[in-house]
Image (spheres, rainbow, N blue to C red):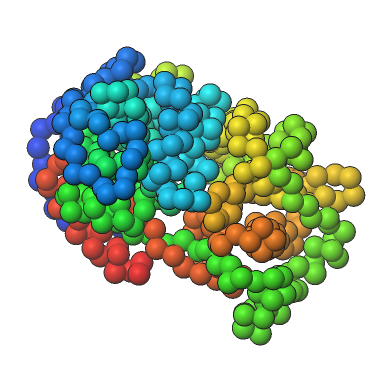
């Protein structure tokens, strides 16, 4: 067994847990070790291994209530079969995207929930079994073989790439001899962007299909003998429905910019306080003072050379993040399929017979992902670049969908520091693009109170959690109440 660890966290406090015998068959007392578990990569003792074939979760009857004036092709459907598939390639892009578009609403297609984006993650080996993301997507078909609902779902052996942090929950499970990993994760991998997660076609049976799919998720959680099911960055409406079905609700905070029909960046600045307006103008002046040229490229304007260079910038950013992995003495590191590609620079030490390996760097995405994703999403891709002379020195990746620009990744030349370039590429260029394209908002990713000073305001995010163990469920529920009071 292998475990990824980091700094300890007070999330769950000092609540006493009920100890019980578990499948791990041993209780490890590690209270003297000042680390919090990030992930456990299990050896021989595992939960139920997911089938590589399609898995049927049952057949269900649909009752037609009817919606006056609705004349969809699905009105005659009476039965629904729910299946689990091991790859998104087992469903057509048109069928998947129809569910995604209907769930988001007219004109609100979320690019991260498209078949193109999710398939790019699988095809480029970013979200696969080898990286700790086993696709277990849920598909609902009626008796005419129409797809009425889909769910992006993964069986995970760690908590990396989620942005809703449950490392201390894993720590608590492990401390009391219980197993937290594997777990089921409903999300878009590596993407802290809010959107619907239970993707259902707009038919007479929409509410019924939603309820059936949620029940199927819970049934799958029990069938796989995993600790929990997590649905992260879902819509507020979905979160409310799941709370009524017994899911725990968790809230977080992001910072978004809202376009109030601005005609120019200067007009936006006039809505800011004088001190903030002055600071932004000073930061933007530094870009021209450094002889940097900013460009916004879309679709066919982005060439292969841009993606190759941007990937180097992306790796420069990720390689400067510290990852610590814990190995038990009987575990061969070569046998562990880590979700991250670790750099060779490493230090290691032993505490109480346990080996800790400290390494720099974790890149979730591969070079092929950027090329693949760009070829499928076309003009939905916006790459902000910074050039010094003829040399590309920085870039920021955004996706455009519905009424939003989504800022995702940033990277720059590893050998040079450019003051204020991060703010320009990631925040101000996105705002200018939103004004130019008449887009309603910019979502600039996870965390960052510094964004308030630059026109981005706090917005609540939601996640839903189904914890099987009643004792841990109660403790985590109490924690979430305390946490929410601090967040909001």
Say which of 295 and 149 sits in front. Answer: 149
Horizontally, is 182 left or right of 469 in the view?
right
Residue furthest right in the image: 389
**Which residue appears at 43% of the width and 50% of the height?**
105
Q: Is residue 247 visible?
A: yes
Horizontally, is 266 left or right of 22 in the view?
right
Say which of 30 and 360 sits in front. Answer: 360
Residue 341 picture quarter:
top right
Say which of 52 and 63 sits in front. Answer: 63
Question: Is residue 258 placed above or below 190 in the rendered structure?
Answer: below
Residue 299 picture quarter:
top right
Q: In what quadrant of the picture does the C terminus appear?
A: bottom left
Q: Is residue 476 visible?
A: no
Q: Position of residue 75 (x, y in %)?
A: 27, 35
Q: Position of residue 433 (x, y in %)?
A: 68, 58
Question: Is residue 97 placed above or below 242 in the rendered structure?
Answer: above
Q: In what quadrant of the picture does the N terminus appear?
A: top left
Q: Position of residue 2 (x, y in %)?
A: 36, 29
Residue 60 picture quarter:
top left
């Amino acid at each position: 067994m292998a475990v990824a660890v980091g700094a300890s966290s007070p999330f769950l406090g000092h609540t006493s847990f009920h100890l019980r015998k578990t499948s791990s068959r041993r209780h490890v007392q590690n209270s003297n070790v000042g680390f919090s578990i990030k992930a456990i990569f299990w050896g021989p003792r595992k939960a139920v291994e997911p089938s590589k074939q399609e898995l049927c979760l049952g057949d269900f009857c649909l009752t037609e209530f009817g919606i006056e004036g609705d004349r969809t092709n699905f009105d005659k459907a009476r039965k629904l079969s729910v299946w689990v598939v091991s790859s998104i390639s087992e469903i057509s892009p048109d069928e998947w995207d129809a569910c995604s578009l209907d769930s988001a609403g007219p004109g609100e297609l979320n690019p991260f929930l498209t078949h193109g984006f999710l398939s790019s993650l699988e095809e480029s080996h970013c979200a696969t079994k080898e990286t700790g993301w086993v696709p277990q997507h849920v598909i609902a078909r009626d008796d005419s073989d129409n797809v009425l609902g889909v769910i992006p779902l993964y069986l995970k052996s760690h908590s990396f790439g989620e942005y809703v942090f449950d490392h201390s929950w894993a720590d608590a499970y492990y401390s009391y001899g219980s197993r937290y990993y594997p777990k089921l994760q409903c999300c878009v991998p590596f993407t802290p962007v809010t959107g619907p997660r239970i993707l259902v076609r707009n038919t007479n049976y929409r509410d019924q299909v939603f309820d059936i799919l949620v029940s199927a998720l819970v049934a799958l959680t029990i069938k796989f003998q995993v600790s929990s099911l997590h649905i992260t960055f879902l819509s507020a409406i979905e979160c409310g429905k799941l709370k009524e079905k017994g899911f725990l609700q968790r809230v977080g905070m992001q910072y978004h910019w809202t376009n109030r029909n601005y005609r120019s960046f200067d007009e936006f600045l006039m809505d800011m306080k004088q001190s903030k307006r002055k600071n932004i103008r000073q930061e933007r002046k530094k870009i021209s003072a450094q002889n940097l040229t900013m460009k916004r490229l879309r679709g066919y304007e982005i060439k292969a050379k841009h993606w190759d260079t941007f990937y180097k910038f992306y790796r420069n950013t990720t390689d400067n993040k510290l990852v610590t992995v814990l190995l038990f003495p009987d575990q061969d590191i070569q046998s562990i399929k880590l979700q991250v590609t670790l750099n060779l620079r490493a230090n290691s030490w032993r505490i109480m017979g346990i080996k800790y390996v400290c390494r720099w760097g974790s890149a979730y995405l591969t070079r092929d992902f950027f090329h693949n994703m760009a070829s499928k999403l076309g003009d939905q891709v916006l790459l902000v670049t910074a050039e010094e002379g003829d040399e590309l020195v920085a870039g920021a990746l955004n996706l455009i969908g519905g009424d939003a620009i989504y800022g995702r990744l940033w990277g720059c030349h590893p050998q040079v520091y450019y003051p204020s370039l991060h703010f320009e590429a990631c925040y101000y260029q996105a705002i200018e693009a939103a004004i130019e394209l008449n887009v309603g908002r910019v979502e600039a990713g996870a965390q960052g109170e510094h964004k308030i000073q630059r026109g981005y305001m706090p917005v609540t995010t939601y996640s839903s959690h189904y914890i099987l163990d009643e004792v841990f469920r109660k403790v985590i529920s109490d924690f979430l109440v305390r946490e929410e009071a601090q967040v909001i």
